[in-house]
């Protein structure tokens, strides 16, 4: 049984018949990691947590690739950053970023792609309401991991003020965008 099936819309669309399936998956993982890196470069440098398009990229990858390929993609990205490549927001890299105030958000992407990808594989991505709920649950997972880690550095009230409130409008717009984009992939499948 293949790790990927027709329940991942982007994988189904990109059926490069001349490319070996393993190579196709590796190319998608590398491309997804590059997309997350690009999302980091589009940034409003708030402290301690910058506003970026990374959560949009991460949730898109989870919902378009499925949870397994999405997990591998985010894991590659985090590994690149951990070894010092400048893939994180503000051109940063290194293990201290993963162990710092924003590390919980970054690590929270792993369970977020599992949740959002799993739900889309189960059919939630075929309608805008299902995609909206999958993206919302993925976002909640990111906050549920990120906020407690940030609170260890800033305290609970400051974590909510600095790591939640400034992001609510932008993340709501990202969720709405995903709710309309992901079902279009299913229409193509």
Image (cartoon, rainbow, N blue to C red):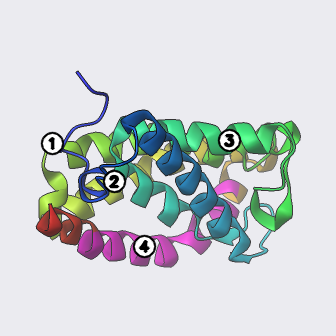
Q: Position of residue 161 (x, y in %)?
A: 66, 65
Q: Position of residue 118 (x, y in %)?
A: 27, 39
- Per the image, the residue denoted by label 1 is 122
Question: Residue drawn 25% across and 64% down?
Answer: 132
Report the disc number at residue 78: 3
- Per the image, the residue denoted by label 2 is 16
Query: Label 4: few (<14), some or many (≥20) within 10 Å?
Result: many
Mark nearest the camera among 2 and 4 is 2
Q: CA distance from mark 3 to mark 1?
A: 26 Å
Mark 2 or 1, nearer chain start: 2
Mark nearest the camera among 2 and 1 is 2
Q: CA distance from mark 4 to mark 1?
A: 21 Å
Mark 2 or 4, nearer chain start: 2
Mark 3 or 2, nearer chain start: 2
- Per the image, the residue denoted by label 4 is 174
Dot 1: what SS? loop
On whether residue 162 falls in the magenta region, the answer is yes
Mark nearest the camera among 4 and 3 is 3
Question: Residue drawn 25% across and 75% down?
Answer: 180
Quadrant for the C terminus, please.
bottom left
Quarter of the view holding residue 125: bottom left
The residues colored magenta run 159-181
Dot 3: what SS? helix
Q: CA distance from mark 4 to mark 3?
A: 21 Å
Mark 4 or 3, nearer chain start: 3
Q: Position of residue 18 (x, y in %)?
A: 35, 49
């Amino acid at each position: 049984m293949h790790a990927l099936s027709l329940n991942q819309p982007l994988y189904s669309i990109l059926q490069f018949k001349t490319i070996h399936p393993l190579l196709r998956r590796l190319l998608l993982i590398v491309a997804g990691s590059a997309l997350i890196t690009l999302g980091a470069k589009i940034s409003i440098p708030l402290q301690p947590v910058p506003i970026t398009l990374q959560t949009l990229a991460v949730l898109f990858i989870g919902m378009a690739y499925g949870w397994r390929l999405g997990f591998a993609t985010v894991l590659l990205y985090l590994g690149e950053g951990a070894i010092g490549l400048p893939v994180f927001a503000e051109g940063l890299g290194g293990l201290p970023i993963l162990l710092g105030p924003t590390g919980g958000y970054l690590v929270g992407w792993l369970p977020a792609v599992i949740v959002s990808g799993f739900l889309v594989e189960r059919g939630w991505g075929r309608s805008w309401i299902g995609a909206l709920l999958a993206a919302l649950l993925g976002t909640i997972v990111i906050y549920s991991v990120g906020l407690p880690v940030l609170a260890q550095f800033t305290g609970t009230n400051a974590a909510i003020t600095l790591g939640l409130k400034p992001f609510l409008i932008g993340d709501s717009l990202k969720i709405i965008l995903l709710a309309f984009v992901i079902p279009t992939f299913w229409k193509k499948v």
